Image: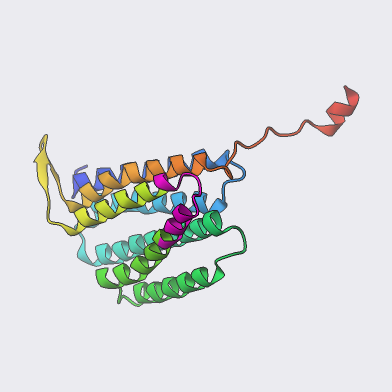
């Protein structure tokens, strides 16, 4: 079966698989904020759906428009979890509620635009740009407070920004007979950013290996 946009499809599938793998890696870290796991899960779902979209749906205009809106909404949900995880990691549990309220409002607005068929790249940039600005601000505050592993997180954000710039560009080239367009380059550059973020989360002191399950009390008594 021939893929409509092979490079974009395969790189999106790879991005999705990487994100899901990262989420699975965090399952064994019982003190890691669950928002991090959900961030990777939603990014993974968006990547896998995006791979299917670029590979099989993009050639059908009407269905492709609906599919792409769904992908955009999945990414928006993932960014919401990224903000929630950043708030908890940087400020602590139960703090930063005003930031989450702002995010909830922007996500609701974007969701309404998607459902009503009025979403666009501009609305995505405005709503998600606000959320990412809050994320960057939080980690800059963490850097000022000398919190651990902030450099890795900011590095991941910098890589993600570079990926977004590549997507906005018209850069493309052909290698081994495969044409890499801005979408595929965006996916490729995002992958090391996700990997760097996973390393940062695993190294933070509030993330530890889950302890082994306690022994069965009845077995302990009989022993």
Task: Please identify the quadrant where the N terminus is shown.
Answer: top left
Quarter of the picture containing the C terminus is: top right
Q: Nearer the viewer, residue 174 or 94?
A: 94
Residue at image x 53%, y 72%?
A: 98
Residue 179 in which image quadrant: top left
The residue shown at (32%, 66%) is 69
Query: Which residue is at the front of the view, 216 or 163?
Result: 163
In this rendering, does residue 19 appear at all?
no
Question: Which residue appears at 34% of the width and 60% of the height?
Answer: 71
Q: Which contiguous range is marked in magenta?
A: 137-152
Residue 62, picture quadrant = bottom left
In reply to whether residue 65 is colored magenta, the answer given is: no
| 201 relative to 63 in the view: left or right | right
Main secondary-structure element of the magenta-colored stretch: helix
Q: Is 150 colored magenta in this rendering?
A: yes
Front-most of 56 and 75?
A: 75
Q: Is residue 202 above or below residue 110?
A: above
- Residue lying at the far top in this picture: please name it: 223
Residue 156 in view in this figure: yes
Q: Position of residue 151 (x, y in %)?
A: 40, 46
Vertical arrangement, residue 125 with respect to residue 204, above or below: below
Identified at 37% across, 64% down, the residue is 133
């Amino acid at each position: 079966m021939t893929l409509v946009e092979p490079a974009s499809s395969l790189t999106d599938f790879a991005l999705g698989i990487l994100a899901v793998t990262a989420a699975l890696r965090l399952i064994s870290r019982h003190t890691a904020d669950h928002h991090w796991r959900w961030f990777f899960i939603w990014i993974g779902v968006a990547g896998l759906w995006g791979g299917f979209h670029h590979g099989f749906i993009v050639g059908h205009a009407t269905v492709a428009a609906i599919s792409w809106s769904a992908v955009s909404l999945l990414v928006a949900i993932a960014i919401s979890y990224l903000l929630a995880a950043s708030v908890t990691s940087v400020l602590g549990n139960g703090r930063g509620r005003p930031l989450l309220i702002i995010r909830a409002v922007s996500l609701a607005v974007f969701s309404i635009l998607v459902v009503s068929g009025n979403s666009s790249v501009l609305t995505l940039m405005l709503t998600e740009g606000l959320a990412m600005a809050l994320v960057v601000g939080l980690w800059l505050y963490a850097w000022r407070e000398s919190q651990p592993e902030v450099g890795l997180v900011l590095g991941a954000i910098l890589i993600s920004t570079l990926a977004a710039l590549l997507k906005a560009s018209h850069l493309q080239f052909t290698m081994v007979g495969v044409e890499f367009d801005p979408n595929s380059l965006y996916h490729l550059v995002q992958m090391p950013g996700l990997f760097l973020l996973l390393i940062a989360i695993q190294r933070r002191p509030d993330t530890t290996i889950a302890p082994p399950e306690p022994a069965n009390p009845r077995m302990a008594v009989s022993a």
